């Protein structure tokens, strides 16, 4: 329960609405004041609607949109039917994305016989609000009504593109990727958002009796691997550039905390959004909050309940911050956008964080049947394998290691530890002892590798080869013989061994070594579940891998690179047909796990391919 009051005028003097605590406190203080005695002590000493209009306009000019909306609201209290005040406030709300409130103000103007100019303005603002609410068909109708009176051509084409995306999942993947690459910088303020529609594919939320209650997401028809399942714009997200080096102050669990991570920053952002868009409160408050709070209902509706903000003078401050914190703890996703493929992956100290709605309803499996990634500020989920209608769809909240280490992460992240996915079942069959031994071997391998790196031993050396080989053998011994190929712990070691052979081949001009490299890459792909098999992928072309299963445990990008490297080994040996086959496989896998066509692949892997072998780039383009 929020229970603090702050001087509204003092707060209004704090400049810069930068989504931080000031704005939150300011908004909340309205509520406390408004509710306490029904009058607004923050009133300035103005008397006429026109004076409040001018005051609001001045705030608006300084981009203090919430303050502007407040002034106009005061003016509207004096003259409730003042078109100009309603139109202005509607624009102010649009600027801070309080769309329902904006829609209502413009509709109030439309409901009266106003001047043609006011009607066109109100109509286009109502359309903008509906666009913001994702009601693109309504928005399009309205924009078309006033096209010609106002310059709305761009809005109309944006609406048509959104309708296409929303109904078919047909996105311009490469364009969106490039747009984000251009617009997003580490120090970006404000954060650029992708202008896209949400998409909900062949999935629905259902009560999951099989899981002992709770909810889950299931397939509503048979799904092919690589199909788009969900495109989700975040309910809210936070980026490192929005964090002040000194931290932000935040009321958390009843006391003041300093916000230092993007995840912590989601709380004030969620509160802020709910204050402006109370109709969205249930979308967040019905997410899973852990065991410390009452369980949410077994149903979940993705449509907001329409009860928009009255006026910013009367905000419901009854938000349970501890509850919201718990929801964020259990439902927050890391939100690093995919980038161009690169050799050395840099990891940000602070990773962006996002709260998503539908993706949060997917239950966990380490061996998951979906693959997710961030494209800009949005999340994309695709099918990771062929899926039968009615099957529960899962996503991985914890990965790596074995069933024991994952159980620890799951307890921390989800409050429970039991996972019966294929990977955990296989690990359990290997036995706890074998699993612990495997982790030890991996640590020892890392130590040896670091030692070799420190001593500047070249990657092509026998030292590296032996380190990979002996540790691969040791790890293989921890797997039960009947386990099959799925052995993700050996993935990176096989890949490293292949790298060693490729380096040596290049250094010694010995193309026969590419045979050895290839064997290692094949082992590497098998370890994450990629099956080699001639598979028809339509229009008469074949790929050398099975198409019903994509790699497990998030190894998709590495697997694409592996396939490009297989192509390279063939290419270097003059085996053009085989090289082309593997180029096709890499392209196919990228399209299946990331979407788009060859232009999207090109945008991401062009530089990488150029670096490993310029000739390969040509192969990818033919
Ligand atoms: Zn599992």
Image: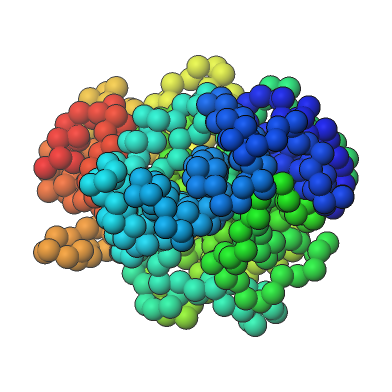
Instruction: Using the image as rendered, state which of residue 314 and residue 371 is in the foreground.
Output: 314
Q: Is residue 263 above or below residue 170?
A: above
Instruction: Using the image as rendered, state which of residue 104 and residue 598 is in the foreground.
Output: 104
- Residue 116: x percent and y percent? 34, 49
- Residue 248: x percent and y percent? 73, 30
At 72% across and 42% down in the image, what residue appears? 27
Instruction: Using the image as rendered, state which of residue 584 and residue 52 is in the foreground.
Output: 52
Q: Quadrant of the C terminus?
A: top left
At 46% across and 58% down in the image, what residue appears? 112
- Residue 74: x percent and y percent? 67, 42
Q: As drawn, is 428 to the left or to the right of 452? A: right
Q: As drawn, is 319 to the left or to the right of 406? A: right
- Residue 111: x percent and y percent? 46, 61
Instruction: Using the image as rendered, state which of residue 220 and residue 527 is in the foreground.
Output: 220
Q: Is residue 606 above or below residue 127?
A: above
**Quarter residue 327 falls in:** bottom right
Q: As drawn, is 507 to the left or to the right of 235? A: left
């Amino acid at each position: 329960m929020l229970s603090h009051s702050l001087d509204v005028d003092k707060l209004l003097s704090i400049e810069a609405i930068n989504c931080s605590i000031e704005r939150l406190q300011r908004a909340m203080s309205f509520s406390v004041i408004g509710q306490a005695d029904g009058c607004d002590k923050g009133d300035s000493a103005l008397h006429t609607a026109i004076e409040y209009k001018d005051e609001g306009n001045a705030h608006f000019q300084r981009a203090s949109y919430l303050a502007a909306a407040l002034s106009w609201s005061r003016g509207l209290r004096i003259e409730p039917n003042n078109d100009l005040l309603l139109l202005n406030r509607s624009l102010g709300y649009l600027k801070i994305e309080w769309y329902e409130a904006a829609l209502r103000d413009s509709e109030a103007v439309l409901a009266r016989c106003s001047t043609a100019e006011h009607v066109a303005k109100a109509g286009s603002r109502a359309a903008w609000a509906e666009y913001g609410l994702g009601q693109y068909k309504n928005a399009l109708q309205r924009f078309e009504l006033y096209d010609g009176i106002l310059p709305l051509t761009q809005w109309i084409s944006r609406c048509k593109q959104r309708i296409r995306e929303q109904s078919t999942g047909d996105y311009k993947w490469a364009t969106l990727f490039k747009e984000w690459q251009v617009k997003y910088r580490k120090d970006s303020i404000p954060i650029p958002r992708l202008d896209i529609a949400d998409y909900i594919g062949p999935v629905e939320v259902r009560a999951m009796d099989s899981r002992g209650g709770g909810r889950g997401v299931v397939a509503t028809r048979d799904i092919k691997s690589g199909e788009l399942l969900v495109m989700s714009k975040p309910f809210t997200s936070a980026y490192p550039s929005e964090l002040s080096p000194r931290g932000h102050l935040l009321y958390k669990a009843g006391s003041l905390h300093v916000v230092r991570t993007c995840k912590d920053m989601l709380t004030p952002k969620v509160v802020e959004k709910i204050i402006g868009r109370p109709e969205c409160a249930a979308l967040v408050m019905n997410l899973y909050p852990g065991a410390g709070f009452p369980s949410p209902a077994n149903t979940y509706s993705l449509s907001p309940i329409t009860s928009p903000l009255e006026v910013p003078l009367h905000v419901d401050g009854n938000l349970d911050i501890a509850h919201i914190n718990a929801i964020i703890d259990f439902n927050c996703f890391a939100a690093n956008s995919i980038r161009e493929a690169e050799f050395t992956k840099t990891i940000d100290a602070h990773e962006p964080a996002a709260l998503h709605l539908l993706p949060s309803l997917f239950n966990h499996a380490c061996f998951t049947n979906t693959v997710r990634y961030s494209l800009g500020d949005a999340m994309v989920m695709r099918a990771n394998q062929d899926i039968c209608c009615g099957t529960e769809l899962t996503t991985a909240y914890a990965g790596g290691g074995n069933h024991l280490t994952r159980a620890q992460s799951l307890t921390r992240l989800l409050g429970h530890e039991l996972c019966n996915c294929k990977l955990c079942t296989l690990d359990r069959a290997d036995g706890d002892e074998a699993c612990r031994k495997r982790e030890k071997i991996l640590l020892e391998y890392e130590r040896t590798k670091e030692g070799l790196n420190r001593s500047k031993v070249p990657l092509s050396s026998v030292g590296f080869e032996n380190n990979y080989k002996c540790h691969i053998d040791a790890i293989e011994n921890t797997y039960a013989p009947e386990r099959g190929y799925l052995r993700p712990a050996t993935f990176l070691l096989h890949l490293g061994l292949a790298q060693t052979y490729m380096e040596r081949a290049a250094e010694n001009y010995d193309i026969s070594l590419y045979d050895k490299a290839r064997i290692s890459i094949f082992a590497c792909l098998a370890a994450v579940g990629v099956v080699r098999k001639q598979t028809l992928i339509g229009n008469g072309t074949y790929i050398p891998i099975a198409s019903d299963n994509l790699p497990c445990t998030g190894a998709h990008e590495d697997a694409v690179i592996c396939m490009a490297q297989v192509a390279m080994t063939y290419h270097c040996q003059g085996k053009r047909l085989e090289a082309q086959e593997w180029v096709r496989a890499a392209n196919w896998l990228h399209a299946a796990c990331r979407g788009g066509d060859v232009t999207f692949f090109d945008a991401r892997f062009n530089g990488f391919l150029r670096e490993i072998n310029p000739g390969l780039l040509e192969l990818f383009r033919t």
